[in-house]
Amino acid sequence: MLRRLLAATVTVAAVGFSAVQAAPTQAAPAQTQAVVPQAAGAVFPSDIVKRDFPDPDVFEQDGTWYAYSTNNDLGHVPVATAASAEGPWTTRGDAMPAGPSADWAKPGRTWAPDVHPNSDGTYTLTYTAWHKVSGRQCIGVATATAPRGPFTSVGTEPLICPLDLGGAIDANTFVDSDGTRYLVWKNDGNAISKPSTLWLTKTTDNGKTLVGDHAALLSSNVIAEAPDLVQRGSRYLLFFSTNGYNDCNYQTTYATATSLTGPWTVQQRPLLTTDSFDGNVCGPGGADVVGDKIFLHGWANGSRHLYVGDVGWANDWPVVRGSRVRTEAESGQLNRCVLRENSAGASGGRAVGYIDFADSWVENRVFAPVAGGYTLHVGYANGSQGTASHTLSINGTSQGSVSYPFTGWNQWRQSSVPVTLRAGWNTVRLGKGTLYTEVDYLELQ
């Protein structure tokens, strides 16, 4: 009899980008913490501002968290505060009550604010606004002496406004490890049926002045927007959103490089999708990564709410709690079982079978951003004419078993169980239980 270990992942391709790769799924164990004693299943990002609050930008300073959003009924640049990332959050009105620069912009489409604290105690806001003359969107800049404003626009012209490329949107401040400050932004080619590019531009004077030429990071014929640039060790990660923002198809992916000048490689699978959250966040996009938290918006009750989730770093690769991550069973260690090639219908065409004996097992490592409850989804095919099972142990400790209803061989389904994990890398072992099952992959959520 053949057995397979199957784990489900999102298989949406990164369409329209020049280079695609998959993040590694195995790594050396990290520091471990005590196991939480009760398995509670998957934990999804929390809805922390239960009203329209899209395209978030968030930072923490002196024990207070500040969040800003695209314009809505609260004002041109809505602002909210909290004592912790999880809240409770309180909306505080408009951080830019006078609106975008009256010299070049008009109100009504003030999008995607980015607020950055400066070393001199001031704050710089870069924002997207409606260009009076062209009707396109361009990027402006404003300053304030307090994080809640009031921010006052600077200059009589936009900071960035390439009208021949469709205008500019979605500025994001990035400060490199050497202290050099940049803006990452998008030319809005989608508005004029042209390719869109994510650009990097050096700035000075607290982000109010551009220095040198614009450097292209990624170009695409499809939507790529809302960039957020993060540095982890020697790796740069460029998070961005794809697809239209107006429904649940919006999603978050990322590209990596070892130099700001590239080359940048887009990951094979998106990081956050509606499906990867099992529908618990609709259209997860506009992501802003702040340390071990990720802020994003998602559709709820007809508007885009602000959510927060936990993010961990598996050897500097991001893992978001609640979003499914797949590990192919055959990538782990196999003991007295068989890697079956050409497994029809299995993920990657391969699966693990013949987990038939008392000392048969397949063992994989999975990464948990924080300690606590998760859901382990096992992809399987069971041709035993009855419900089969595997024993389940995590980090050498039994956590029960996984049951597999009959499917027929090469008829792949998924079985799910709650598990308790420690923060960092965990070892998951499936061993001989009752009857016989083949395993394709593990998916941790």
Image (cartoon, rainbow, N blue to C red):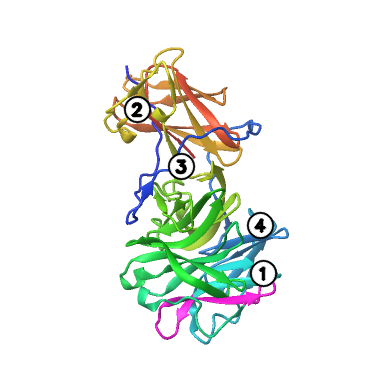
Distance between mark 4 and mark 2 Cα atoms = 46 Å
Q: Secondary structure at mark 2?
A: strand
Labels 2 and 3 touching (C-beta < 8 A) = no
In this view, the mark in front (2 or 3)? 2
Earlier residue among tags 2 and 1: 1
Mark 4 belongs to which amino acid?
Pro
Q: Secondary structure at mark 1?
A: loop
- If the image is split into quadrants, where does the N terminus sit? top left
What residue is shown with label 3? 324
What residue is shown with label 1? 147
The label number, if any, that marks residue 88 in the structure image: 4
In this view, the mark in front (3 or 1)? 1
Q: Is residue 145 magenta?
A: yes
Looking at the image, which is closer to me, 256 or 433?
Answer: 256
Residue 400's x, y, as percent?
53, 23
Looking at the image, which is closer to me, 19 or 64?
Answer: 19
The label number, if any, that marks residue 90 in the structure image: none
